[in-house]
Amino acid sequence: MDEEMISKLGPLAALAGTWEGDQGIDIARVHSRETETRFRERCVFEPLGPVRNGPQELYGLRYSTTAWPLGENDPFHEELGYWLWDAANRQVLRCFMVPRGVLINAGGDAEAESASFHLSAEVGSETYGILSNRYLDESYKTMKYELDVRIHDDGSFSYREDTQLWIPVNEAIFHHTDQNRLTKSGAR
């Protein structure tokens, strides 16, 4: 892997490579009931850059994630996207889509040497926002997305996501949460 490019990834540099973890916990609504699913996950992060938007220069990671319930072969979650580092503005961005028809562009402040960062997106925002297909917009509208990432001294990383869904039938916000701790499974 190109070490010069890795050096330009700021707080994302440690994530380059392939990661796996089997300590995942997903709290979701399944058939109108809160359900906990234990899962294993594989994430692949491939460096890219520079991406230039006029004077803005981004470096990042092209990524894919797949998660399977423990003991099962069929995944229950997949996503594709980019994690980006904007060094000039000290911003981490995560732009991704899931095959349910949801797109999220989340961002947050960080320093190049940060070992943890927080990203968020809100429906209606013209910068860090959320788009959903018509069905989800009317029945399980994603209102807010928050992500906390921590890179640990032992070389692992962990995350906690909170996807806040408006469910009109209940007239309430449901916190669909996911968390896991992953270790690098391939050489960087």
Image (cartoon, rainbow, N blue to C red):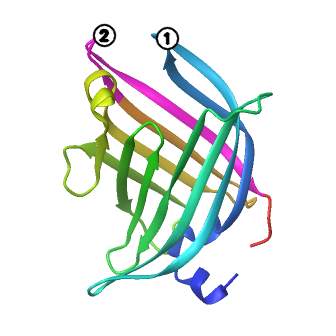
Relative vertical location of residue 59 with respect to residue 29 in this rendering, above or below: below
Q: Is residue 30 visible?
A: yes
Q: Quadrant of residue 107?
A: bottom left
Residue at screen point 37% across, 49% down: 104
Secondary structure beneath dot 1 equals loop
Residue at screen point 40% across, 62% down: 93
Residue type beneath disc 2: Asn
Residue at screen point 80% across, 59% down: 185
Q: Is residue 116 magenta?
A: no
Q: Is residue 169 magenta?
A: yes
Along the line of sight, the residue nearer the viewer: 61 or 11:
61
Secondary structure beneath dot 2 equals loop
Horizontal relation, residue 71 to residue 135: left or right: right
Relative vertical location of residue 141 with respect to residue 87 in this rendering, above or below: above
Residue with the mark numbered 1? 31
Prevailing SS of the magenta stretch: strand
Q: Quadrant of residue 19?
A: bottom right
Which label was assigned to residue 22? Answer: none
Give the spatial CA distance, label 1 vs label 2.
13 Å
Along the line of sight, the residue nearer the viewer: 150 or 51:
51
Along the line of sight, the residue nearer the viewer: 119 or 46:
46
Residue with the mark numbered 2? 170
Residue 86 % position (x, y): 38, 75
Q: What is the magenta range?
A: 165-184
Residue type beneath disc 1: His
Position of the N terminus, as image quadrant, is bottom right
The first of marks 1 and 2 along the sequence is 1
Q: Quadrant of residue 2?
A: bottom right
Residue at screen point 42% across, 26% down: 175
Residue 50 % position (x, y): 45, 84
Residue 45 % position (x, y): 62, 64
